[in-house]
Image (cartoon, helix red, strand yellow):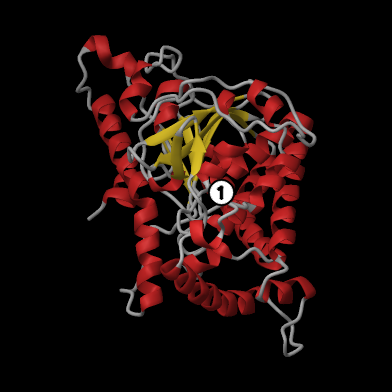
Amino acid sequence: MAAGNGRSGGDGKSGGNGGPGGKAKAKANGSSKASGEGKAKANGDSRASSTRPTANARRQGNGKVGPINLALQGGGSHGAYTWGVLDRLLEDGRLEFEAISGASAGAMNAVALVEGWLRGGRDGARESLAEFWRRIGEAGAVFGPGMAMATGTTLTGLPATPDWWIAQSSALAAQWYELLTRSFSPYQLNPGNFHPLRRLLEDCIDFERLRAQTQIRLFVSASNVRTGHVRLFDTRELSVEVLLASSCLPTVFQAVEIDGQAYWDGGYLADPAIFPFFYACRSRDVLLVMINPLAHAEVPRTPTEILDRLNEISFNASLIAEMRAIAFAQRLVREDWLVPERRGQLKDMLIHAVLADGVLSDLGAASKFLTAPAFLNDLRERGRRAAERWLADAFGQLGKRSSIDIRHLFLAQ
């Protein structure tokens, strides 16, 4: 679950399918053939055609609204913030989902949600997400300051609070990361190519049943190392290898090989991919859950501050590009620029967002490697509070209008 992010283009070739849960012993290593790379191919998929009828989020008599599409950013352990957002939305119970697109940690959250949904609906999805992040915390709590958070005390015997954890371990993680990655590659540090998430994914996700389900469609992005194109994996192609490819930070892990192609973190080229919602889905509503803050009040001055801001800008770049395209499409539709025979072929997407600005702005990029349970739970609570605010402020606009100003938020000079 690397702290990655990025740009788009890819197709959405296969379709979603499958059933639930439990622990998958079968290894689904390979993915089926590439859906292609680059946005152009997405247009050529007969099932993912832009002429597919569109639908607004429906308000049903039981209070439920949907379906909508979810777009989940990646960002290493900060994905626990998205866990909190999803947990609160599922607890609220009013949203239905057509599809979920994710990169890196966003892809992990998407798969964990659907795995649990198949087992037990919303409650099952919440349990699956909690179990996934509990396992992440257990795996990380044996290292460095994480052990202090696991035991609840620092080496001095004082309580280890989330604030202490952020201040201490962010600095330590940054120092160790810089030292190791500037001196050694993962091919030198980890010649056996051990990946701590492989066993966790095999235990928590039944990929065979996930690929067969048709309730919620999934899109997972990865970056092709050789071509520099995004590769979008659809539901029927998902496997352990696909999730590891989507979260492969190249300074930490060796590139993941799938069908003879090498892949790095999907966040570099699509964080997350929005374009499949145009071509492969009916719903016009997209709820984006961001991990990387867009704005920064101060000009960074220290080396760490500069690298943190570069991380945020780089990993938001592809999303901003997609938002520019969406804003242009909205203008074409709303200002009646299209010839009559094309008017039904372009969606006027309705965009909503749970932002990270002001919520995760105090966390540097190095903290995306930190997985102590108390830190993850702190992120979860931040996500739940952010989702609560979104439900109060923007839920009523689903199916009617965008609840964010794309031009102001993403495109203003």
Q: Quadrant of residue 60?
A: top right
**Nearest the camera: 344 or 304?**
304
Relative to residue 330, is residue 80 drawn left or right? right
- Answer whether residue 213 is visible to the viewer in this image: no
Residue 320 location in percent, x, y? 33, 46
Dot 1 crowding, Cα within 10 Å, few <14, some 14–19, many 20+ = many
Residue 334 location in percent, x, y? 28, 27
Does residue 48 sit above or below 185 in this rendering? above
Q: Quadrant of residue 271?
A: top left
Residue under the image location 69 percent in, 53 percent down: 133
Q: Which residue is the extreme one toward the top?
A: 341
Which residue is disc 1 drawn over? Answer: 105
Relative to residue 351, is residue 39 drawn left or right? left
**Nearest the camera: 215 or 390?**
215
Look at the numbered disc 1 and give the secondary structure of its residue. Answer: helix
The amino acid at mark 1 is Ala
